[in-house]
Each structure stands twice: as C-alpha cells, then as structure tokens.
C-alpha cells in the first residue's frame, strides 16, 4: 500500500512538472508573438495587393474588379448590366476578363 501511494505521488509530481514545462513554453511563445507584432508595427507592413499582382490571372472576381477600378458593388453591377465587360458565369459567380477590366481603367 505504501509503494502504491509513493507511485501516485510520483505520477502527480511528473504531471505537475510537465504542466509547468508546457506553461513555460506557452509563455515563451506568447513573448515571441508579442515581439513579432511589435516588429510588424515598426515596419508598418501593408498587405495591399499591387495592380500587377491582380493582373496575373486572365479572369477576375467581382471584388478584384472593384478594387482595381476603385468602384462600389453597385457601380460594378451597373457597368456589368450595360455590357461594359466580357464576363463568364460559373456556378453563380461572375468572372470578368482582365482585358475588358483594363480597358475601363484607362
């Protein structure tokens, strides 16, 4: 009985040590994350997509066209209804040819 109690205490002690190690590692990760966030703020990172990257695909989605032309969804709809773009509908999604969009941008 005494050895059983000793084993239980040893198991609890190992579990506590493992929990402390995990907490210590989490703390280090949180500190590193905070450091990375500070570095990103210092660099003033912008995730804006340049026009040349958007234009790598032949077909553009509505949100890409709106960003590229700087128009609202309502304006894009009006242009589309007026036949200003070459479009293709696939599964309920409209795709615009890059060429027709670029003609409007000029």
Image (spheres, rainbow, N blue to C red):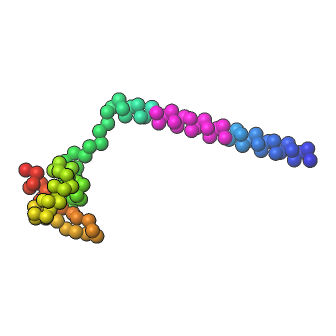
**Residue 56 drawn at (x, y percent):** 21, 54
Q: Which residues are magenta?
A: 19-34
Q: Is residue 7 left or right of residue 55?
A: right
- State whether residue 54 appears in this view: yes
Q: Residue at x 41, y 34 (%)?
A: 37
Vertical placement of 77 versus 36: above or below?
below
Q: Specify the quadrant of the image occupied by residue 96.
A: bottom left
**Count of marks overlaid on the render:** 0
Give the residue displayed 21% in from the left and 55% down from the top. Answer: 73
Determine if residue 68 is in view: no
* Prevailing secondary structure of the magenta residues: helix
Q: Residue at x 66, y 37 (%)?
A: 20
Q: Quadrant of residue 100?
A: bottom left
- Of 74 and 55, which appears nearest the observer? 74
Q: Is residue 1 left or right of residue 101?
A: right
Residue drawn at x 33%, y 32% is: 43
Q: Residue furthest right?
A: 1
């Amino acid at each position: 009985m005494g050895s059983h109690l000793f084993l239980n205490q040893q198991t609890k002690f190992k579990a506590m040590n493992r929990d402390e190690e995990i907490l210590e590692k989490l703390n280090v990760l949180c500190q590193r994350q905070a450091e990375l966030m500070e570095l990103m703020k210092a660099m003033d990172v912008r995730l804006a997509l340049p026009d040349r990257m958007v234009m790598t695909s032949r077909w553009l989605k509505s949100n890409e066209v709106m960003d590229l032309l700087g128009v609202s969804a309502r304006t894009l709809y009006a242009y589309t209804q007026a036949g200003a773009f070459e479009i293709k509908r696939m599964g309920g999604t409209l795709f615009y040819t890059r060429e027709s969009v670029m003609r409007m941008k000029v």
